[in-house]
């Protein structure tokens, strides 16, 4: 019998630190994805113009929406990556169980969500600086930290929650794929089929689901919804992980 008794929190802490070191390269891929999103955003997300005999005005809109999409994709793929067999086998180097492993994974994904969401919002300001020096902008309308600090920080927190939501979807998707590879094809077919079916049989159903998650105007309710959905997905992934063999 070992004289050293470890509690759950110590095990989770060690696994979490290990995952930060082991998957540190994922932050390089985050930088690459966000730079790629910035390049796609340089052309602007829309515009309008009008002219008369004496003047001509063209208005272009620049936003970090493309960067956000690439960040969500990165979060989804990163969550799948940490459910891979090789990543699971690394946990066997610790005196641990499936619960501590899943808690450490959730903490890691929360950390990546904070970094990914914050950098995605800040990239919007970098985009404005780049367009200011590389285009013939005569006048710019901006709302930043000094102009509206409340909106700035709410935007960061909301983006972090969005990234966490996509991470939780990726995590349970990856866990299902580890149980059976057929889910690689089956899950996308089910999701696409459900959207098509709901779109045909009930035109408003897809919109209701989308608005319920992504268009909540009250931030506290949005926080509860995202944390609740993400928590359920992580809990479901933990239950699924208990169905796996210790080692294949």
Image (spheres, rainbow, N blue to C red):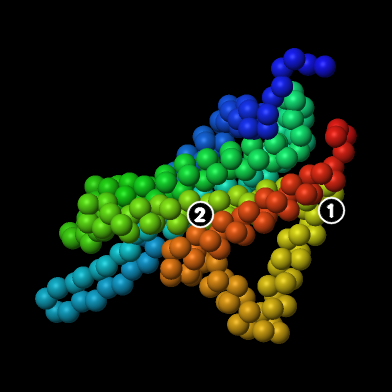
On the rendered image, what quadrant is the C terminus found in?
Answer: top right
Badge 2: how crowded within 10 Å, few (<14), some, or many (20+)? many
Q: Up-down: is 144 above or below 57?
A: above
Toward which corner of the image does residue 57 lie, by quadrant?
A: bottom left
Spot the residue most to the top: 3
Disc nearer the start of the sequence (2/1): 2
On the rendered image, what quadrant is the N terminus found in?
Answer: top right
Provide residue 126's location: percent of width, then percent of height: 33, 46
Could you tell me how far apart the alpha carbons at marks 2 and 1 are, in whole angstroms?
Answer: 30 Å
The residue drawn where x is 40% and y is 52% is 156
Locate residue 31 relative to residue 8 in the image: left or right: left
Callout 2: SS? helix
Q: Residue tagged by mark 2?
A: 161
Q: Up-down: is 55 above or below 76?
A: below
Provide residue 74's location: percent of width, then percent of height: 57, 47
The residue drawn where x is 46% and y is 63% is 220
The answer to whether any part of residue 55 appears in the image is: yes
Callout 1: SS? loop
**Residue 182: numbered disc:** 1
222 or 55: nearer the viewer: 222
């Amino acid at each position: 019998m070992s004289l050293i008794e470890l509690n759950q929190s110590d095990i989770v802490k060690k696994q979490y630190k290990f995952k930060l070191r082991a998957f540190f390269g994922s932050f390089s891929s985050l930088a690459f994805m966000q730079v790629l999103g910035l390049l796609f955003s340089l052309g602007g997300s829309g515009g309008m113009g009008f002219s008369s005999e004496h003047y001509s005005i063209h208005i272009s809109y620049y936003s970090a929406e493309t960067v956000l999409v690439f960040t969500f994709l990165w979060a989804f793929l990163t969550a799948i990556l940490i459910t891979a067999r090789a990543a699971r086998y690394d946990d066997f180097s610790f005196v641990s169980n499936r619960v501590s492993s899943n808690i450490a994974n959730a903490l890691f994904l929360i950390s990546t969500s904070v970094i990914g969401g914050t950098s995605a919002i800040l990239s919007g300001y970098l985009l404005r600086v780049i367009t200011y020096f590389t285009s013939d902008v005569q006048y710019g309308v901006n709302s930043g930290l000094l102009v509206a600090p409340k909106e700035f920080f709410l935007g960061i927190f909301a983006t972090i929650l969005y990234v966490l939501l996509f991470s939780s979807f990726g995590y349970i998707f990856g866990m299902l794929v580890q149980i059976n590879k057929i889910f690689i094809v089956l899950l996308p077919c089910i999701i696409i089929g459900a959207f098509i079916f709901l779109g045909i049989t009930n035109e408003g159903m897809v919109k209701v689901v989308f608005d319920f998650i992504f268009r909540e105007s009250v931030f506290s309710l949005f926080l509860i919804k995202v944390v609740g959905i993400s928590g359920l997905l992580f809990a479901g992934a933990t239950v699924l992980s208990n169905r796996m063999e210790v080692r294949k």
